[in-house]
Image: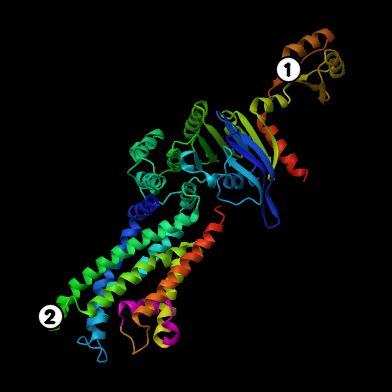
Amino acid sequence: MKNLIHAELLKLRTTRAFWAYIAAALAFVPVSIALSITTASDTAPLTSSEGLRGVISAASAGGLLVLLIGITMMAGEFRHNTATTTFLITPVRNRVIAAKVAAGTIVGLVLAAASSVLTVAVALPWLAARDIDVSLLSGDVGVPVLGAFIATGLAAAVGIGLGALMPNQTLAITVVVVWTSIVEALLVGFLPEVGRWLPTGAASALGGTVTAEGALLPFWGAALVLTGYALAIAAAGANLLTRKEIA
Amino acid sequence: MAAIEIHGLSKRFGEVAAVDDLSFTAREGAVTGFLGPNGAGKSTTLRMLLGLVRPSEGTATIGGTPYAELAEPFRHVGAVLEADAFHPGRRARDHLRVLAVAAGLPLARVDAVLREVDLADAGHRRVNGFSLGMRQRLGLATALLGEPEILILDEPANGLDPEGVHWLRQYLRAFADGGGTVLVSSHVLAEVAQTVDDVVIIADGRLVTQSSLTELANRSRAGVRVRTPQVEALRDALLAQGIAAQLVAADALVAMESTAEAVGLAAAGAGAVIYEMTPEHFNLEEMFLELTTSEGASR
């Protein structure tokens, strides 16, 4: 299993697309911070706990890109015909899925760590310049950072499961981008009683995104909901993959 | 025990039987040509043998064990099923490194196989800059990574230039001579006729024949075509010598399974005038076509 995880990480590191995704994910961090700070509203000013958490939610900005990395890890095998060799080396396909989920989770956690460091390094001096002093050890930093680790860590498993369910990579990426950034975003915004139970709603709650009072699930509820989605989608993908004819 | 054993193998896609009760073997130390027209079920059979497609019925084993149950399949069987099975943005050497790591093989094997297929100088290049011939060789390098005893190649000559085909022939010959087992599919018999020891011919998912190439050649009608105004007299003279002859035109016949010498002697004895005499070599390709199409027509 260790060999397989190592191989999956090597697969990622040896393509330029992976590094482009990582660069884009990190580039989102300062953009997200800038948006939060410049558009802070009176209902959640930067001096409030909500406002601060909204700024630090930049730490989970890379979640969507890790989701897309997860999709390419699985659907890319079909796109480039490498699935054949992968399953010739490892005929037990559940082991392939497990190795991909493990490798993707490692990528997600490392990216969450890098995004968190970047967030703190950019946001705290920026806030200090506006005479807002935030302690690195305060809950307003700690909670969104912990949420970023959970949400970004789980994102790859969701992507890998979706990649197995939708082996057409272009279709899978299109569906996910449209679903998360349009359908779910609208539901979270306008129909929160539904939206809060969806993956994006749960991820937003974990990251500390600012919304209307009580619109999102509490932190631990969101963590459970998102974990449930990740396990269910990865399991559905694995189930389909083990029965698939590789032709 | 045969290295590869297919027994009663069938695959149905809905109503269509892609492979129908197929049985054959491939032995060690030999190159077995797996032949049939496009759509005959060759690829489906190979994919069932390799655990990628689930058989509807029957078994396919490697040394008595289904592929998926082999402990370290990549160390026993090397397979090339697609000409192009690489991430285009990955360097050739990295492609092999990934597989070596996954299969638990030493990284020294990566450079060894790159040398073996003459790609040592191209290892640092991304695969999207590779010609089809280079991709074919990288595919073979992939299959050789685990130092397998068995090689399974699906239409390896597709898109290879003549030089590449020649190189592949020699490679497979040497591999089998070294005790290895090779199963190589093709829809063109002539492509593999120079390399194979045994042939397995299928059409419409069914076995047409399995034999050695020599046996197959002997079965074909070698003969001598003769042009003479006295066809009847010559035919009788040939029959008297125990040589069957077939009239093919008003002034021509074919002496079956015979030689120019024997026909010449019989003609001299009968006083027949010979205008033209042509030894007809057996034509494997024609026979292959006949075998595969008549089987298809009979269904």
Q: Quadrant of residue B276?
A: top right
Residue B248 badge:
none
Residue B58 percent coordinates (x, y): 66, 46
Left or right of B265, for residue A89: left
Residue A34 percent coordinates (x, y): 23, 78
Q: Secondary structure at mark 1?
A: strand
Q: Main secondary structure of the magenta part?
A: helix
Q: Quadrant of residue A119?
A: bottom left
- 3D distance between C-alphas at marks 1 and 2: 104 Å
Read off the chain for label 2: A
| Circle 1/circle 2 CB separation < 8 Å | no
Q: Is residue B157 visible?
A: no
Q: Which residues are magenta?
A: A192-209
Indicate whether residue A199 is drawn in magenta: yes
Please give the count of numbered marks on the rendered protein. 2
Q: Is residue A120 visible?
A: yes
* Extreme residue toward the bottom, this view: A42
Give the vertical position of A53 relative to B101 (above or below): below
Indicate whether residue B295 is drawn in magenta: no
Residue B277 badge:
1
- Do marks 1 and 2 share a chain? no
Give the vertical position of B56 relative to B182 (above or below): below
**What amino acid type is highlighted by mark number 2?**
Ala
Give the vertical position of B65 relative to B229 (above or below): below
What sort of colour scheme is used for the picture?
A: rainbow
Left or right of A189, for residue A85: right
Q: Which residue is drawn at the image coordinates 36% and 70% (left, top)?
A: A64
**Relative to the observer, which residue lies in front, B36 or B107?**
B107
**Foreground: disc 1 or disc 2:** 2
Which residue in the structure is indicated by mark 2? Answer: A129
**What amino acid type is highlighted by mark number 1?**
Met
